[in-house]
Image (spheres, helix red, strand yellow):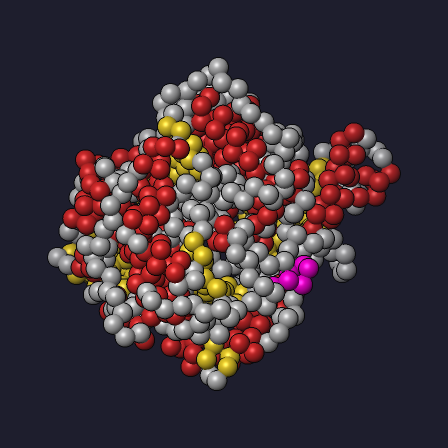
Amino acid sequence: MITIQNSPVRYVDGRFIPTDQEQGRELTIAHNILTAHNTSDSPAKLQLKFDAMASHDITYVGIIQTARASGMKQFPLPYVLTNCHNSLCAVGGTINEDDHVFGLSAAKKYGGEFVPAHQAVIHSYMRERYAAPGSMILGSDSHTRYGAYGCMAIGEGGPELARQLLGKTYDIPYPRVAAIYLTGAPRPGVGPHDVALALVEATFKEGIVKNAIMEFFGPGVANLSMDYRVGIDVMTTETTCLSSVWQTDQQTKTALTLLGRGNSYQELSPGNGSYYDCLVTVDLDQVEPMIALPFHPSNAYPIRVFRENMADLLHQVEESAREQLGVEPPSPLSDKVKNGQFHVDQGVIAGCSGGTYQNLKRAAEILQGQSIGSDAFWLSCYPGSMPINLELTKRGYIASLMAVGASIRSCFCGPCFGAGDVPSNGGFSIRHATRNFPNREGSKPGEQQISYVALMDARSIAATARNGGVLTPADELPHIPADRPDEHWDYDPAAYQSRVYFGVGKPQPQEELVFGPNIADWPEQIPLPDNLLLTVAAAIYDPVTTTDELIPSGETSSYRSNPIRLSEFALSRKDPQYVPRAKAIQGLEQLRRQNPTAQEVTEAMAGYDPSVTGLGSLVMALKPGDGSAREQAASCQRVLGGCANIAGEYATKRYRSNVVNWGMLPFIASDLTNLNLQPGDRVYIPGIRSILEGDGSSVEATVLQTSGPSAPLTLTLPNLTREERDIILAGCLINYYAQ
């Protein structure tokens, strides 16, 4: 199904040849796009400027506030503000709609594009309106992936978008490029999510494509429709790659023509002799219907294998719930197995991965004339955009889905991050969505509420719905409709023309920003002191820590425009004592700056000089930052006085960037498990300011454990650039630009 060669190859005359020579790197699709957008003199150290940007309503207020505080007068490139995350405005009173009003006022003042709530999922909109071969788009959402259109798109934290708004560049070393070579054609009943989950499972755990660009090509591409390619491409985020790009062909050209942008088409394909850092071969003929069990998209198996091993795999899920969430499952998952069949409680087809035209059309065809039944199982369908919804309605597929008992929702990202269709306590949901992280479906383990989400393709979700919730792979149905590569849909932009504010390039400086009562400025951050004495406020020994565990998604995101209020939720579902621990240290630091000789300060300093040693907190995690690009995963720590993360490694480049841009030190340390840091332990870091002012990359720290003797600890800061050093020295990105 999938084979991996984790060593360099050259693509010569349709074959891959192992190589130890890097010649041919300039022949890849990725190289041509990166070079066209690089403003530096060095091909090894890229300084990129993008063609367009996009943000949704969890991130754009903070980005605009950051850029505005740093001197921005207008948007220097097309910037699209969508409203597809916090669209359910009853949560938190008026504050969600207040942000939408702010967004519209900002689009008018600075010259942007504003997409009102329920019009489109951010990525559906950008694919329809902006993605084009050879272009680059930056988005403040981790699933910013438009590679199927030949567009290299990157999801990043908000400060990186603020940099673009200030005319700065996106600075990265030249990335690794992975060849993703597709052969064959999918079998009927096997959808894009099946291919995507198989790819994530094969690459995530070993980090095969971490921070690389995945370049898709090969004879199998021609056998996939554009919607099918999009469905695979958007899930590349879950491999932890940096970006993705696909070869283009007649299907790409036809799709762009139907979107009214045919003149943006250009043919992209790797040159003969292209060099790749690794090779992943996907035989589409061999992919089976898949299921990704809780609590990660990489926890994926063919549905056939899951059904053959239900008892063991369900037990593993229960153990994960106990270990990761600290929750005793309300009832054994084995209770959902009846007569050898697994019964699920809910199905959802939604968002940037599930809500495509082809997915929902296929679901309607599979369910045609049937009923999902009147028992516990229920099904919700979310079209990705109003043009998709309109086309499905015109062709009768929405009516067909409604007739079988499915609920049709608006164009909204909600169920993907816990703001819609939350299952019951102990419920099991199958979803064609991007993630199934713990907490992301809306459950609250801290209140002993837990539900389970498994990822599946829309076709198998529809097959399961057809059987009243009995887990069923679509390829078991007779006469399953096939997915044709030439399956396009007619795009009608009428809904956008009626509702979207198109203000790109037309700033109105006289317009006033409209602030709701929950929109607040970032609190002041101080420059880095000479030395640091940091208290461990949270220690996480899970193999991977997601951004949703660092700052929960769902209803907590309503407070994203108020940094202080949002920070109250930091790690709340992972370690509820983190916030009070961090606040206690923050209070001592504030007292130290006012009165360094105060008794409480003297007692806290462990004998170190309070005039040159700052107090702060840190988070220790083995591998933090998988998942969302939301900067709040880092900024909330900073708002609470956080000064550093200590990690074995960082799960994604975007989380490490967020840590740096918010003025925190992204330390790496080895053998953290044996060190066994615990909340309350302290780490003294001498001379850290002088190290950053120079070019040092390591510091000999001392661990002061609450139990046991002190111990040395080597902390490193690998690959810290001069600008990153200066940002941390200044205290945060806003301070850096203010200087």
447 in the magenta segment: yes
Quarter of the picture containing the N terminus is bottom left
Residue farthest toward the top in the current orientation of the protein:
510
Residue 522 in the image: x percent, y percent? 61, 31
Q: Quadrant of the C terminus?
A: top right
Q: Quadrant of residue 663?
A: top right
Q: Position of residue 640 (x, y in %)?
A: 68, 41
Q: Residue at x 74, y 47 (%)?
A: 580
Q: Which residues are magenta?
A: 445-450
Q: Nearer the viewer, residue 377 or 369?
A: 369
Q: Is residue 10 visible?
A: no
Please state if 585 lies on the left or on the right of 314 as rendered. Answer: right
Q: Is 48 above or below relative to 105?
A: below
Q: In screen coordinates, is 461 left or right of 261?
A: right
Vertical arrangement, residue 583 with respect to residue 163, above or below: below
Report the front residue among 599 and 28. 28
Q: Residue sitting at 73 percent across and 43 percent down?
A: 583
The quarter of the displayed image where residue 132 is located? top left
Residue ID at (38%, 55%) = 354
